[in-house]
Amino acid sequence: MNTINRAVTTGLSLLLVILTGCSKSFLDKELIGVNPQTGSMENPENARAAVNACYAYVNGGDWNQGLFPRLLMESSTDNGWGANDYQDRPAELGVCDFTGVSPNNSYIDYFYKNMHEGIRNCNYVITNLAEVKTLSEQLKNRYIAEAKFLRAYFYFELVKDFGGDVMHNSFDPADATLFLAKSPPAEIYKQIYKDLEEAIPVLPAKDEYGPADIGRATKGAAMGYLAKAYLFNGDYANAAATAQTIISSNKYVLETTFSKIFEPENINGTESLFEVNYKNAVGFGNGPIPAEVTGAATVDGGWGWFGLTSDLENAYIAEGDNVRRKATINKAGEVVDNETPSRIFPSHLISGKPAHTSFRYYRKFYIPLNKRVGSPWQFNDIKMRFAEILLIHAEAAAFNNKEADALTSLNKVRARVGLADKTGLSGDALKLAIWNERRLELAGEGTFRWDDIRRITINGKKLIALLMGPNGTFVKYNTTLSTDPIEKAGHREAINKGYYFKEGVHELWPFPASAINANSALVQNPGYN
């Protein structure tokens, strides 16, 4: 395990000494218990640990946060079910089916706090590291650039999920009493651009890091998130140009075999721009990444949460995409893709009924039996990879009416899995093909589908409003068209998931009640008062 992994715990402990303990709220910037002997970043180990403690919040500072992005966000889409059928889980399923999305939902509260605590840690590093004299200017500037990259990452997560939000970039004890109003999304995006543009010229390229620093932010990662932020904010010219710069750098290439991307031995592979480095285990308590623990099948030592839908499987079948279907879905009763010796994935029944909404489990984070070596098992979480850069470039080029460029990038992704080139497409048909490719390529890896259905507009309506609600196509498929025997078997999870989606409300999460109570200037998102 590399240095960034080993030092995360140290970094968190250090920040308990040199940062606020959040005694009043996560917006509290008061410094408590400062000890210049042990907490000062003049000590190089402390400086590194403080930066590592910023990385610790990428997947959240506690196991509750680990659940949220995939279990609750992706399970709120046409890709996923909450799935586990042997526990009452009203807090989780209430988010998945939109009946329990409220300011008092604990998982929304955890997510929001974690992102702001990550920003707080970055602010501490950016504000205070500039004054440190003991580090070389090169290392000091690189650490500050890493913190700016991570601050942009946290702001990007917040603006996607909450819209306008509190934005604060200093770390001053006098700020503890501030009550801050929301900044509009446009201002948050400006800050994201600024942080990433300042980080890019300072951060090393991926191949310039030594073994001890593998997994830290790179120039390519910062450019990748800048391209993605441009795309999500509708700046298609800059999105295409930035993605093209990454493509032309030749620092990243597609893995030749799709399933190889997710094999546990292929950490920080040729396709990876940014991934969280850690160890994982199916058994809870053995590893710090319970989003994957909970996603593992109950018959495989996990909790069986997050199941893939027959609707997603049908999308692969409709495209003739057997490669990504098998590499994404472990289906009970079928052979597990790329496992030696061959294994039929088992079922789990309770009183003769399926203990899972679909019996479709997530293959990408599954560790083959013969690779479960040691305890815990190592498994990284890829946040951005080169295929996404190609699809960002394709989408931005399509919006720029550069159809040939868009098709070139789109077809590179398709060729990897043996699919024929798309040809002759333009306008809406081209965009629909690219969005469908994003679904098939990136399913379940994070919040890709959740982010996409809330940002994509088709004929004046957000895609989420076309899929969900009483007349949504996904709701109608599940309630009237689907013949899938497992999904129709009757579960704790309602078959009409998405029926209670409210257009104009559920495109954004509510601000947690704890944040509203702590900051009287923070105005709740529409529909949640």
Image (cartoon, rainbow, N blue to C red):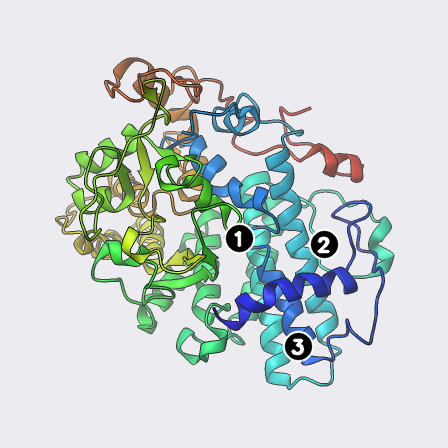
Could you tell me if residue 204 is visible in this image? no
**Which tag, 1 or 2, sits closer to the chain's start?**
2
- Which of these two is toward me, 302 or 194? 302
Disc 1 versus disc 2: distance between alpha carbons?
A: 29 Å
Measuring from the top left, give residue 48's x and y in whole percent: 63, 73
Q: Earlier in the sequence, mark 1 or mark 3?
A: 3
User: How many callouts does the rendering have?
Assistant: 3
Which of the image's four quarters has the C terminus? Answer: top right
Identify the residue shown where x is 60% and y is 81%.
139
Residue 288, label in figure: 1
Q: Amino acid at mark 2?
A: His
Q: Amino acid at mark 3?
A: Glu
Q: Which residue is mark 2?
A: 168
- Residue receiving disc 3: 45
418 over 249 or under it: above or below: above
In this rendering, position of residue 320 left or right of residue 486: left
Rendered location of residue 182, percent (x, y): 70, 43
- Distance of label 2 from label 3 (alpha carbons): 27 Å
Classify 289 as above or below 100: below
Residue 429 in view of the camera: yes
